[in-house]
Image (tube, helix red, strand yellow):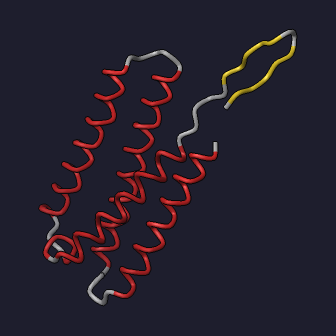
Amino acid sequence: MKRLDKIFSIGLMLLFVGVVWAIATNRVGKIEWMLLLVGVVIGMLAGMIQGWAIAQKELGKIGSGKRVLYVVGTLIVFVALKVTLNIMIPSYLATSQIGIWMSVVFAIGGLFLGRALYSRPPVKSISRGSTRIRG
């Protein structure tokens, strides 16, 4: 559980740094804020899918190959969606180097938050008549 807390705190820290950075940059308008929010949401979904795949591997429901397929496939789809959004809606985020890095910070923050927010169901194990919950 401590590892997920660290991942969650890193994700929050990245989002906080991204918000401060975006506020300090005078060129971030409504469209850019919406694109950053969409990037965070897509990142969270990708992180949750990756967390699900890792949990399924730990539970023995899928093999290592499928886990790698889910994790890498999710990253590829995530990057493709972000690039497509930046091409379809041209803005400061897509045309400047600072904007691109800002978008990356928000997206990775969302990815870490999604990974930390996915909680696998506790596994109940019976040991000498007592029930312990491992998590």
Residue name at image x 45 percent, y 41 percent? 48
Q: How many numbered marks, from 0 up? A: 0
Q: Position of residue 109 (x, y in %)?
A: 42, 59
Q: Nearer the viewer, residue 37 or 73?
A: 73
Left or right of residue 6: residue 124:
right
Residue 118 as seen in the image, left or right of residue 86: right
Which quadrant is home to the C terminus?
top right
**In which quadrant of the rendered view does residue 91 lie?**
bottom left
Place of residue 100 in the rendered image (x, y in percent of width and height, measured from the top left): 22, 69
Q: Quadrant of the N terminus?
A: top right
The residue sitting at 53% across, 47% down in the picture is 116
**Image vertical order of residue 135 relative to residue 11, above or below:** above
Q: Is residue 22 above or below residue 3?
A: below
Residue 19, image x, y percentages:
43, 76
Residue 77 placement (x, y as % from top left): 23, 42
Q: Is residue 85 above or below residue 133?
A: below
Query: Which residue appears at 22% of the width and 50% of the height?
Result: 79
Residue at left 79%, top 23%? 132
